[in-house]
Amino acid sequence: MKKTQFDEVRKIWEFYEELNEIVYVADMDSHELVYMNRLARELYGLKSLEELKGKKCHEVISDSLNPCAVCNYNKLEQGKFFEEVCYRPVIGKKLLLKNTILEADGRRYRFELAVNIGEWGGLEKDSELNEVMINEGLRIALAAPTPEKSIEVLMEYIGQYFESERAYIFEDLGNGICQNTYEWCADGVASQKENLQKVPVDVVSLWYKRFLNGKSVIVGSVESIREKDPDVYDYLKPQNIKSLVVSPLISEKKIIGFYGVDNPPERLLYHTTHMLQILGYFLVTILRRRNLVRRLEELCFLDQLTGIGNRHAMNDAVSKVAPEKSIGILYCDVMGLKRENDSMGHGAGDALLIRASECLRREFGEYALFRVGGDEFLVLCEGISKEELQERVEAMKVDMCKSDARMALGFVWRRDGKEDMDNLIAEADRRMYADKMEWYRKRTGILLEKER
């Protein structure tokens, strides 16, 4: 592999720097540490990444001169995660470990992410049932391929384990609004997620007061809160909720949401409360990881100026076009961008590109939009009719004039997506170029010799 590949891997590791989980990377052949995130360095008494140079993982992690006798190197496989729970005496913590192999520059590296389960509090030492439940929940959640799937799996596990009708997460969006972002429903139970978007935090203000003290909310009977908490009652009653338990999701001493279950059996109410408080820490960890993945995806697939997809996103979308659906492609070129940059500055040029992207959003917002070059955009419309595509293109022309964002346009339509997509895009590009030349011809008044 090329030398630059190791640098790219290091850039990815840097995203773990502020994660509240322990992360380290070690060379599998030499056992030398090549990366530890901030939390890991603090726990193991290292002040900077420079102090890692020359140190073996077993020297730092286990305070041993020799590789650990229980080292799981031989159990690791590239592309798969090996999970186990262990106690690390050097830092005095019980950890849930997730290990895999990374390759770069022809070398293999062990990547370990460790969740501290020794500080969760409330985990009774003599409660084998609690520990089994937690370990099993974490095992199946961490085995999921993405953080999004981990959350969905954990919601299902919690809902089923506590014999509830619904399990859900509400996330605080700021500006006094929260909303239901994840939901699991038992068979025969109607989903409520769509009805619980942009809920004013004021509705659950009494809950938040308890959350700020690290406490959960138990409603053994919804009818019992009819008078003292009417706002919550008005939300719960139409959902056929008779009882519930909700616990806060707290990150860095700030409430980022809450999660809970509806209609658990009465015998499990207080046990549910205890276990939700324990699992809340881990759920916050997954949400952070989800946010990290989303940010990485934004960096990889979004144009940072306009906020629409970039060429990488277009290539991904094109590869997934359904052959049985009709397909429309619109290719656009922003006119006068160079002149705007030269005469008014690049800020004005950026503003022109943003106006152009907003035109596309208004007329084609429900379809896939991409910025594929400096001044070029592409719209991919699956399932669109030829008539609708033509109507939207005409509407675009009107919108462009109003927005002072003239673009040359070229579009193609096919009854299905079986034709080679590169050929279709090239045809839309040619038609756009013809439109562009016609615009310049009319603008300058210069006729081609054969037209005279």
Image: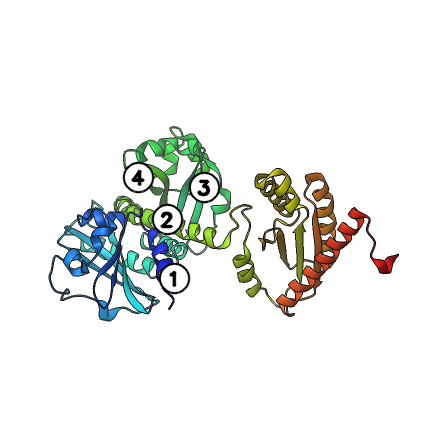
Question: Percent position (x, y) of residue 14?
Answer: 34, 52
Q: Which is nearer the N-term, disc 4 or disc 1?
A: 1
**Circle 2 sits on which residue?**
287
Q: Where, quadrant-wise, is the C terminus in this rendering? A: bottom right
Q: Secondary structure at mark 2?
A: helix
- The alpha-carbon separation of the residues under discs 3 and 4 comes to 20 Å
Q: Which residue is mark 1?
A: 4
Mark 3 — residue?
Answer: 179
What residue sits 12% from the left and 64% below the top?
66
* Element carrying mark 1: helix
Q: Residue visible at 40% across and 32% down?
A: 226
Q: CA distance from mark 2 to mark 1?
A: 31 Å
Asked whether the viewer can see residue 262, the reply is no
The residue identified by callout 4 is: 252
Locate residue 231: give its quadrant.
top left
The reply, left or right, for residue 108 in relation to residue 382 is left
Which mark is in front, 3 or 4? 4
Mark in the foreground, 4 or 1:
1
Q: Earlier in the sequence, mark 2 or mark 4?
A: 4
Tell me: 62 left or right of 172: left
